[in-house]
Amino acid sequence: MTMKKNILCIGAGYVGGPTMAMIAHKCPKYKITVVDINPQRIAEWNSDTLPIYEPGLDELVLATRGKNLFFSADIAAGIRDNDIIFVSVNTPTKTFGAGAGMAADLQFWEATARQILQYSQSSKIVIEKSTLPVKTALTMEQILNSAHNGIFFDVLSNPEFMAEGTAIQDLENPDRILIGSRETERGLTARQVLVDIYTHWIPPEKIVTSNIWSSELSKLVANAFLAQRISSINAISALCEKAEANIGEVARAVGMDSRIGAKFLNASVGFGGSCFKKDILNLVYLCRSYGLDEVADYWEGVVKINEYQQNRFTMTMLKAMFNTLAAKKICLLGFAFKANTGDTRESPALFIARRLLEEKAEVVISDPKALQNATIDLKDVRGSIRYVEDPYEATAGCHAIAVMTEWDLYRNLDFKRIYRTMSQPAFIFDGRNILDHRRLFDIGFNVYPIGKPPLTHF
Ligand code: UDX
């Protein structure tokens, strides 16, 4: 069967893999190839154990792989044989030189642009999927169109808004698809090619087109607004603890205002994930580089409150447990940055684990999907760390439990049984407010939720 379109995606990560699997599923007449510089990662995408955990992903890949979805390590052939190229390589925060700790590290991005130029024998549409600082498309265009050899590249911006843990649902039924392009005749023609792909399953009113810079910026701004809501509610959670108010009640009352809305108002130990912190710092750096210091300071506050919240959580633990954690066993229930993923990037659990180890606590880490990543993250950290998947075994003998991730599994544990196996007095610090605090208190625990008065037996 000849395929109607050949599409390539460079970068087989959390964005590239699932997005291409969805396009392959929805467009059976298109041939999709996903390539990556890491052959091991490609081998995993071709195996029974995919490199990432995401509900529904296994089924999607199984249904399409080998039919119209292919994972390959041959980047040169991929570029040569495809005229539509998505780029979803990682753009981590720069760790060196100018803008270290703030700006995006674009070295992988630029290397990819140069590879595309090197191997292309015909004109192509190149689509930015990774989150990038505004104006990256300009750099991309400049590199790609530097050869003056009759081959022309159109660069589009098509940021991905899906969240981990619900990626497949989000890809199937997104709030919107955003496509930015140059507003020239060529740019608009290229944009239509991408619109045609999404039209296979997305209603036209949800496909939003814009100028290319607006599209790049919208992704950073969307993440900044989402993170800002969490920092806002977390800041108020500190006040609730002092004022004997209840953050759950405040969030409900505030969220019922239709102008505000009820989502993303769960107070927590802090937000994590690969995007929020990175994107806000990126935004802050961008503002500063344009001389907009007040704007930069404003958004930087979102990250500062997040650090404050994580630190506050460990201080609550320390104070509650008689100002010393040395040699105390503490079980972290959950290590992933949110439920339904094995991803631990920027997880608050990472920060908390480090702080507890500094206090010389003995840390037991439990998680149904993230233990492998946790082991890698903490391999250079000194101190007593054990990894135990079974929550009953993990909590046995511990002085305290700290809930780090809102896995459903933790809501339904037999806490009577857990209480009996723990050192007394037993403490629970609920960093996600998912447990029944009154019930835990009745069992005998000293309970410290976020943004609510603690329930203690002292
Ligand atoms: C985010 C954006 O939601 C998504 O649109 C973008 O494409 C990538 O970044 P993700 O990082 O996968 O997605 O997860 P998200 O569900 O946004 O959660 C981020 C963090 O905030 C998690 O640590 C989560 O636990 C925390 N969170 C979320 C809260 O603490 N409270 C809330 O009310 C919501």
Image (cartoon, rainbow, N blue to C red):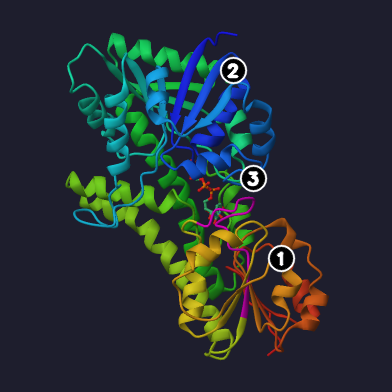
User: In this rendering, does residue 269 appear at all?
Assistant: no
Residue shown at 33% from the left, 52% from the top: 93
| Label 1 residue SS | loop
Q: Which mark is residue 49?
A: 3
Residue 332 highlighted magenta (yes or no): yes
Q: Mark 1 vs mark 3: which is more N-terminal?
A: 3
Q: Position of residue 177 (x, y in %)?
A: 49, 26
Q: What is the crowding at mark 1: few (fewer than 14 residues within 10 Å), some, or many (at least 20)?
A: many
* Callout 2: CB less than 8 Å from ligand 1: no
Q: Mark 2: which secondary structure?
A: loop
Q: CA distance from mark 2 to mark 1?
A: 43 Å
Mark 3 Cα-neighbour bin, 10 Å: few <14, some 14–19, many ≥20: few
Question: The residue under label 3 is which amino acid type?
Answer: Thr
Quadrant of the snapshot with the N terminus: top right
Amino acid of disc 1 = Leu
Q: Is residue 49 left or right of residue 392?
A: left
Disc 2 residue type? Cys
Nearer to us of marks 2 and 3 is: 3
